[in-house]
């Protein structure tokens, strides 16, 4: 009997219908589960007996892939790998099979190449109209020259070399290729680098020069000029730069919200209470940003978001199934518990489908409990601002089965906020430096938490446990508890926890002692490590938005918005 997988529309929306898909029979679902389990344990002969009974071959490519790539229990031949590629070259992991086939091929053999992944993305650079016109007017060699100049500047700033970057920019060979607005835009980048490395005079000189000449076309110059003025106690100047920046709509939401919040702070410091409220309202209109959340806290407002998930109609599902074979595979994979593979199929399908299919695909990702697909697809979706709030449930998923071994001791919103940034809910995530799993734990950190040195041995059974969601979350939760209670004098400061999680507690302690800044927000904006600075911004936003989704207050956010330390308080 064919199993009917019910993909129910949200009960919150009162929907009376459900979309259904024919996938695996109950018997085949059990067979596939048993085969994957047996092969994982290296029991290939036992698995073969069950494979013979499978009626629907839809997941046989995954079965063979697991077998051929087993690290110890099976050595695949070139002919096996080549046959697999001839049948399953469109599978997401086909490149792994192809790489192994190329190593084992006999002379002259040419295995089928994997199907290239197609991509769709919604990322754009937002510029003022005048600055955009400068870039649009570039042609041929000059366009390439500007791209090269900006790339070189970014490289030097990434290496913490602002003086070298400025000298490179001022060289006539570069300088003469740029318009004045393009030059001042880049000067803003360099000024910010000077600022976070404590060279306030250099930062002020460069930022004010660029901001005074090019205005909001040099948005980072305005941002930096305002921060330098604030740090030096010149609130009038801080208000002038940050309010002008906040009045410019052509910039990223995070930058505009930040400028508006700092303009409100400066307005309050200079007795402009009406203008402070005006700029808090501007910041609060961007609730998916760090400063937008702080503005909501200061105003005592909620986001007003309806967290109901996107509906999936039967017609939507039928169209997806007809348009792309990955959809059926994804549903079958989710049935047998292989949610990571299902998520990858959905992400590949996104590149092959059209923008008009995005809503249905997002709805399906939610129904299949594939949060990594939900986050990735939401960020790349073609759905634009007028309907963007309908995506919030997908942007901030609350998946089933994601819980630390032993249960939550730190609030779910905190762990989910970290996971969303660290791995986007992909339990197999691994960074280039070796951080592993949902919470991107370094093996050394995991070993320190547990006292188990085997966790540092890459490829060992112990280290593989870091990819188990429950175990990874258990260790990650313990590390968060340590950062809140043992490090930094155990104050429980959420900003300091997030900075230490990304940057390391030692680096943060040294920075804080050297900086001598009491204002928590100014301390955060002055962190010399850009990745750590951005990490705190995104993670704290995630945590506060998850608080909203889970119907919880955000006491640490409200404290930070009032100029106090954001101390962790459980609200469970």
Image: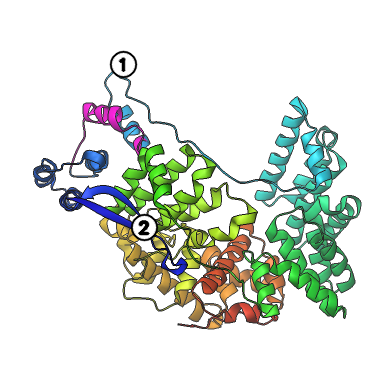
Image coordinates for residue 330, horizontal then vertical, percent: 34, 47
Q: Residue furthest top?
A: 108
Q: How packed is label 1: few (under 14 Cα within 10 Å), some, or many (20 or more)?
A: few
Image: 340 above or below 113: below
Q: Name the one closer to the observer, 559 or 397.
A: 397
Image: 311 above or below 482: above
Q: Name the one closer to the observer, 376 or 319.
A: 319
Residue at 48% across, 72% down: 413
**Residue 136 visible from this viewpoint:** yes
Residue at 43% across, 41% down: 349
Which quarter of the figure has residue 527? bottom right
Say if the magenta span includes residue 84: yes
Q: Name the one closer to the observer, 55 or 211.
A: 55
In the image, the segment drawn in magenta is 74-94
Say if the magenta span includes residue 39: no
Q: How packed is label 2: few (under 14 Cα within 10 Å), some, or many (20 or more)?
A: some
Q: Which residue is mark 2?
A: 18
Residue 108 is marked as: 1
Does residue 430 appear to the left or right of 237 in the view shown?
left
**Secondary structure category for the residue under label 1:** loop
Image coordinates for residue 466, horizontal then vertical, percent: 34, 60
């Amino acid at each position: 009997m064919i199993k009917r997988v019910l993909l129910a529309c949200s009960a919150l929306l009162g929907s009376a219908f459900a979309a259904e898909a024919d996938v695996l029979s109950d018997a085949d679902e059990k067979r596939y589960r048993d085969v994957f389990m047996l092969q994982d344990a290296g029991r290939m002969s036992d698995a073969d007996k069950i494979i013979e009974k499978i009626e629907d071959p839809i997941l046989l490519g995954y079965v063979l892939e697991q077998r051929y790539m087993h690290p110890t229990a099976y050595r695949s031949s070139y002919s096996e790998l080549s046959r697999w590629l001839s049948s399953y070259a469109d599978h997401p992991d086909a490149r792994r099979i192809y790489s192994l086939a190329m190593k084992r091929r006999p002379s002259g053999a040419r295995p089928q190449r994997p199907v290239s992944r197609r991509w769709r993305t919604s990322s754009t650079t937002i510029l003022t109209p005048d600055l955009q016109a400068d870039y649009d007017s570039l042609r041929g060699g000059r366009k390439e020259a500007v791209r090269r100049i900006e790339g070189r500047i970014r490289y030097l700033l990434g290496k913490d070399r602002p003086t070298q970057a400025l000298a490179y920019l001022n060289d006539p060979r570069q300088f003469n290729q740029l318009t004045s607005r393009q030059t001042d835009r880049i000067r803003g980048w360099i000024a910010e680098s000077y600022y976070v490395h404590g060279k306030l005079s250099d930062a002020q000189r460069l930022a004010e020069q660029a901001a005074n000449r090019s205005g909001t076309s040099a948005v980072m110059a305005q941002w930096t000029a305002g921060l330098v003025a604030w740090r030096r106690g010149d609130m009038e100047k801080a208000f002038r730069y940050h309010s002008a920046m906040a009045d410019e709509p052509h910039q990223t939401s995070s930058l505009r919200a930040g400028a508006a919040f700092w303009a409100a702070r400066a307005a309050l410091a200079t007795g402009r209470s009406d203008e402070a409220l005006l700029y808090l309202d501007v910041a609060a209109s961007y609730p998916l940003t760090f400063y937008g959340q702080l503005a909501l806290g200061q105003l005592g407002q909620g986001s007003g978001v309806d967290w109901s998930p996107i509906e999936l109609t039967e017609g939507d599902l039928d169209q997806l199934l007809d348009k792309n074979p990955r959809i059926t595979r994804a549903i079958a994979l989710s049935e047998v518990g292989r949610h990571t593979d299902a998520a990858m199929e959905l992400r590949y399908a996104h590149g092959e489908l059209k923008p008009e299919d995005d809503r249905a695909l997002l709805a399906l990702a939610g129904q299949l409990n594939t949060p990594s697909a939900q986050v990735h697809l939401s960020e790349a979706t073609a759905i634009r601002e007028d309907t963007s709030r309908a995506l919030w449930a997908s942007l901030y998923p609350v998946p089933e089965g994601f819980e630390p071994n032993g249960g939550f001791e730190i609030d779910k919103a905190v762990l989910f906020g970290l996971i969303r940034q660290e791995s986007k809910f992909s339990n197999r995530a691994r960074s280039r430096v070796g951080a592993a799993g949902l919470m991107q734990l370094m093996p050394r950190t995991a070993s320190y938490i547990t006292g188990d040195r085997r966790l540092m041995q890459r490829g060992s059974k112990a280290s593989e446990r870091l990819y188990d969601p429950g175990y990874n979350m258990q260790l990650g939760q313990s590390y968060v508890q340590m950062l809140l209670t043992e490090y930094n004098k155990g104050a429980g400061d959420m900003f300091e926890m997030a900075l230490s999680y990304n940057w390391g507690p030692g680096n943060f302690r040294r920075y804080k002692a050297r900086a001598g800044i009491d204002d928590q927000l100014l301390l955060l904006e002055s962190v010399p490590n850009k990745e750590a600075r951005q990490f705190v911004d995104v993670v704290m936003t995630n945590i506060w938005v998850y608080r909203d989704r889970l119907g919880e207050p955000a006491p640490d956010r409200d404290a930070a918005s009032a100029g106090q330390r954001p101390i962790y308080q459980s609200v469970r």
